[in-house]
Amino acid sequence: MTQPIYLDYNATTPIDTEVAAEMKYIIDAVYGNPSSAYSIGRTAKEIVDKARLQVANLINARPSEIVFTSCATESNNLAILGALKAQSGKHIITSAIEHPAVIEVCRQLETRGYQVSYVPVDQYGRVNPADVEKAVRHDTALITIMHANNETGSIQPIDEIANIARKHGVLFHTDAAQSLGKIKVDVAQSSIDLLTIAGHKIYAPKGIGALYIKNGVKIEKVMFGASQEKGLRPGTENVIHIAALGKACEVAQRDFDKNTANMRHTRDRLFDGLQKFFPQRVTVNANLQHCLPNTLSVALAGVDAHTLASLIGNKVLVSTGSACHAGSVNISPVLKAMKVNAQRAASTLRITTGKHTSEMDVDHALDLIQNTVKQLDK
């Protein structure tokens, strides 16, 4: 059976062939515990050390600043909870459009006596740095604002926000799960203290992530056990997946220009095609000048996105901007924070391209969408 055209790369990515080959080699040949002193243990440790350098190189960090975790959710939890445990302040600043891996941590902290300021976003899903600065208090311990939004692709002005945090002596964390491999991330040039990385967003497998912790930034452990990963993430290292993340970062750095050019080209081809097929019906839920190069969150007026996605689902895979339960529409919290009305949210598709998306994929997807919408319009 012909594989469907995959246009949901912000949800997850397939494992890169070079990454898979690296994993296969380790599965077949390297089974030692990195904490063991004998040769196969040393080999495993060398693989982990190499991966730490590969991850660090992608974001212009030092290897000593990389801690491996199981996923971005764990990285976010470690960053936020660990940073707050190391400080006395009880106030946190975040945005209204964060991933649940940040929002739910903040909500849990509110039950423990912390206060959280949820900074609003504009119609394009972007935070105003001035609003962040207004929210800073004498007891603010942490600012956590995502680098780029997973639904709309909107890129946040994190350099400005990081400078505000530095000015006020507040730690700054950013969830960069969607950023790596799509836009430049340089922690050396930015005043970023903590940065979250997700493996399965950059063609590594699910179940691996990392947290950048700037040298000198103090965070406390939230898990307890042995001394792996500086004691911050105890447990025998997942050598196979760590190596996979390292290789994925190496490939992302090496092929960055080619990949981002292809993602932007195919995303723009999709947008142009939708505008051609549906004049006066297309609304983009982002400013494409400040957006991930692969992401198109677009509403097609008068179209039920769930119905459309379902009808094309055997041939084209996309996401929608709302959830439908028992006949009612639940607007995505991100679109709700942007003050997108229910009608527009219900007609929103999130279409995201990848490094292997071709013009043929795009054109085929456009034809299917056009023909299906014509049927729905009858």
Image (cartoon, rainbow, N blue to C red):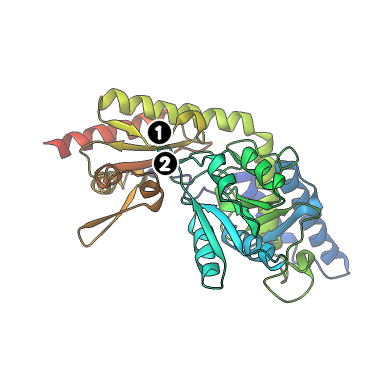
Q: CA distance from mark 1 to mark 2?
A: 9 Å
Residue 361: give its label. Answer: 1
- Most extreme residue toward the bottom is 225
Q: Is residue 169 visible?
A: yes
- Tell me whether the residue at label 1 lies in contact with that at label 2, contact meaning CB atoms closer than 8 angstroms: yes
Count of picture labels: 2
- Most extreme residue toward the left is 378
**Dot in front, 1 or 2:** 2
First along the sequence among labels 1 and 2: 2
Q: Amino acid under label 1?
A: Asp
Left or right of 18, for residue 307:
left
Q: Which residue is mark 2?
A: 7
Question: Quick one: SS at disc 1?
Answer: helix
Residue 33: give its label. Answer: none
Q: In the figure, 112 relative to 58: above or below?
A: below
Specify few, some or many for label 2: CA neighbours under 10 Å numbering under 14, 14-19, or 20 or more: many
Q: Position of residue 159 (x, y in %)?
A: 64, 38
Depth check: 77 or 25 in front? 77
Q: Position of residue 79 (x, y in %)?
A: 65, 60
Tell me what residue is drawn at x 72 percent, y 71 percent.
Answer: 234
Depth check: 292 or 79 in front? 79
